[in-house]
Image: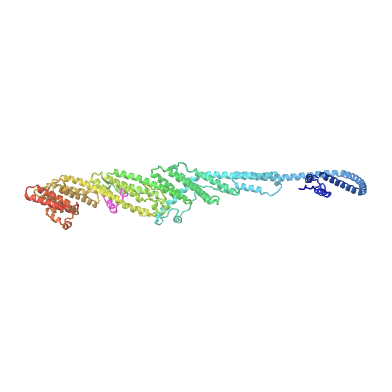
Amino acid sequence: MAPQRRPQYTQENIDQQLQQIHLLDPSSSSENLEQLGPIIKQIHANRQQEAYLRNLQALIATKESEIERICTDNYQEFISSASTLFTVKSYTTNLREKITTLDASVSQVGRGLVEKKRALLQSKKTAANLDEAIDTLQACLKVLDVVNRIGELIQEGKYWSALRSLEDIQSLPSNSLSQTPFYQHLLSSLPSLRVQIQNAVTASMKQWLLEIRNVSGRVGKLALEAMELRTRKWKSRRERDPMLRLSRVGSAVEMVTQERSDTNVLDSEKLKVDFKPLYQCIHIYTTLDSIDDLRKSYQADRKAQSDLILPDPLPLASLVSLTQEICGFFIIESHVLETTGNFRSEREVEELWEALVARLSSAINASLTNETDPDSFMRVKECLIGFIMTLESYSYATQSQHSLILTLFEKYAGLLEGQFSRRFDSIILEDDHLPMQVTTLSERDSVLAVVWLSLSEQEGLAKSVFPLSLPWSQGFYLCCQDIRSFIQKFYNFVDGVSQHHGNIDELLNNVSTLLPRTSCSRLNSIGQSLDRLLSNHISESISKCISSTSTLTQAAQIVSNLEHFEIACSELERSLTGLRSTQRGGAIRLSSSSFANTITRALNRVTGLIASKLDDFFDLAEYDWTPQTRNNTPRMYLYELVNWLTTVVDSLVIKEVYKDEAYQGAVGYIAECLMNFMIGPNVPAMNNGAISNVLVDINFLEAEFTRIGRGHLNSVFAELRSMVSIVLNDTVHDYLIPQVRQTTYSVVRPKRLQTLLEKLARYGMTRRDASSRERGEKRRKEAEAVGRIFPGEKR
C-alpha cells in the first residue's frame, strides 16, 4: 500500500483558514481564539507546523508592508488637519472663558431669587402632602370604622350585613388609599374576617341544633296529641256515619270530609320553633360558596343527635317520651327539607329515618324478649300506633313499623291465649257445678249482660221472679266474662292497626304455637284462637271434671253449661262477624263439635250414674227362676225404680232432648239387666213360669213409660219381648224359617235365644217327671237347631 501523501499548505489555504476566525475578520469586535483549535489540531495532525509557521510569517510581513504603504500616502493631509484643530481649540478656549465670566455674574444676581422660589415650592409641596395625608387618614378612618362595625354586626348576629360590609370594602373605588400598605394589609385580612363570620354563624347554628334537640320532645308530644284528637274526632264521625267505617285517618275520604285546619306544631300558641339561625347559616355558606361543607356538617350533627336518642338497653317505661322525641326530630327534619330548597335531600333524611327506626325496632324486640305480660305489648302497640300515624302524615315510610306491630301482635296473641287458657282451666277446676243464684234485679241484669243466650231464654229469664236460680253455674258466667275480656283485648290491639291493611285475615290472628316466620306465612284468625280456648281449655277441662262428678245434679249442670256454651258459640259467631265486617273481614266460624262431644260424655256420665243407682235396685230384686206358679203383678222393686227414675230425670235442668236421652240410657240399661237375668251365667236354669214373670215386669215398665208420655222408649224391650214370646208361644220352629225370622223376629239374636233355650232344657232335664224331661229334651234340640243358624249372625 502506497504511503499517504501529506497535504501542502499554500498561501491561499492559510488565508482561507485564518479568515474563518475573528482574528482576521475586520468587522469582528472581539477575538475568538476558540476557532483556532480545530485549525491547530489539523496542522498538528498533518505535522505541518514548520511549513505553516513559515507561511504565517510571510503573511504577517506582507500585511505590515501594506499598512506602512497606506500611512505614507496620507501623512501630509494629516499634518494639515492637526494644525487646523489647534487653531479651533484656541478660539474655543477664549469663548469658554467669556461664557464662564458671564455665567458667574448671572448666577450671582439670580441666586437670591432661586432660593426664594425653592422655598415657595417646598412650602406648596409640604401643604399638598399634608392635604393628601389628611384625606388618606380620613379614608383610613372610614375603612376602620367599617371593619369595627363588622365586628359589632357579628356580635349582634347580623352576619349577612357583616358579609355585605366586607364586600363593600373590597369593592371600594381606586384612590390614593388603594396604593397604601395599610389598604393592602386590610385586603389581606378580609379572608380572616370571612372565616370569623363563618365561624360565628356556624356557632349560632350549633347552638340552634342543641336547642331543637331539647325541644324535639315537646314538638313530638304536641304532634301526637294533635293526631290523637284528630283520631278521636274521626272515630266519632265514623260511628255516626256507617259509610265512613272503612275509611281510616289520613285517607282521601277523611281528608275531604273532615272539617279541620292543620295544626302547625312548630308555630303554635304552645311552642314556636325559630329556624332563622339555620336559614341564616345556609345563606352565609351559600354566599361563601361553602354550602357542601355545611350540608355534610349538618348531616353529621343530626346523625349524632339521632344516635343519642335511643338508650341501650331500652326501658319500656320511657318508650312514650322516646317516641315523642323521635317524632319531633323528624317533624323538624321534614320542615327543613321543605323550606331549605336543595340544602337537604330526601335521601339524607331517609337514611336518618331508616337507621333510627331499625334501631328502635331492635331495641323494642330486645326489651320484650322476656316479657310475659300481654299488657306490656298492648302499651307498646298503643305508643307505636300514634307514632306511626303521626309520621305517616309527614310522608315518612312506616312499613317496617307495621311489620314490627305485626310481630308484636303475634307474640301478644300467644301470650294472651296462654293467659286466658290458664284462667279458663282454673275457672272450670274451681266450679262447683251448681246453679248460679241471683237475688236482685241489678245482679240479674249484670249477669245477663255478660252471658250469651238465645232471645227466647233471655226473655224468659227477664220475666222470672227473685230469688232466681239460673240454668248455668258460676263457671259458665266467669268463662263468658273472660271470653268477652279476651275478645276486647284482642281487638283493642287490632284497633288502629287493621285500618292499614286491606285484608283483616292477615292481621286478626292467634299464635299459641308460633309458626316459622316466612315471608308467605299466614296467621290464624281470632275464630281459630277462640276455638282452641273453647275446645282445649273449656270443653276439655269440663270433660276432665265429668269423670270425677259423683252426683246427677252436678252432671246435669255440666250438661246445661255445655248447652249454653253451644249457644254462646253461635252468638259469638254473629257478633264477631258483625264486628269484623266493619274491617273488611270475612265471616267467623266457631266449631262447636268439641262441646257436642263433651255433652255426649256428660250424658254418658248421667246415664252411668243412673245405671249405678239402678244396680242398687236390681241388687234388691229377688227372682225365683223356677216358680211353680206365675205372678200377675210385677216385682215391688220396679215400683220404686220407676218412681225414682222419673223423679230424678224429670228434675234435671237440661233440655228435653237430653232428658229423653237419659231415659233411653236408663231404660236400655234396665232392658239389658233383665236380659242378663235371662241369659247371664248367674242363673243356670229357669222355667217358663220365670219367663212369664219377666214378661209381666216388662208389661209394667212399658205401661209406666207410656203413662209419662215416653212410650217410644218401649222399643228398647223389643228383643226381650220377642224372645220371651218365642219361648212362651212355642214358635221356635217358626224362628228357624229364614223368611219368618227376618220379618217377625229380626231383633232376636240367635245366640241369646240359644242360651235361653239351653237354660230351659237344663231345667227340664233336672225334673223327674217324663213330661218335663221331654220338654227339656225338646228345648235342647231347639237350642242346637238355633245354634246352627249362621254361626256368628247377630251374636
**Magenta span:** 447-466
x then y, percent, for residue 288? 61, 48
- Drawn side of residue 398 relative to residue 279, left or right: left
Is residue 350 visible from the viewing direction of this image? Answer: yes
Residue 154 screen position, x and y as percent: 60, 44
Looking at the image, residue 203 sits to the left or right of residue 718; the answer is right
Q: Is residue 452 magenta?
A: yes
Q: Is residue 465 visible?
A: no
Q: Is residue 465 toward the left or the right of residue 584 in the image?
A: left
Q: Residue at x 43, y 44 (%)?
A: 365
**Looking at the picture, how far across and down is residue 455, in whole percent?**
29, 53
Q: Residue at x 70, y 49 (%)?
A: 174
- Tell me if residue 693 is in the magenta stretch: no
Front one among 52 and 175: 52
- Nearer the observer, 775 or 174: 775
Please name the colour scheme applied to the rendered image. rainbow
Residue 207 left/right relative to 535 = right
Foreground pick, 726 / 490: 726
Question: Can you name the residue that lies furthest to the front here?
Answer: 1
- The percent coordinates of residue 410 (x first, y second) are 39, 47
Numbered marks: total: 0
In the depicted view, which residue is nearer to us: 96 or 233? 96
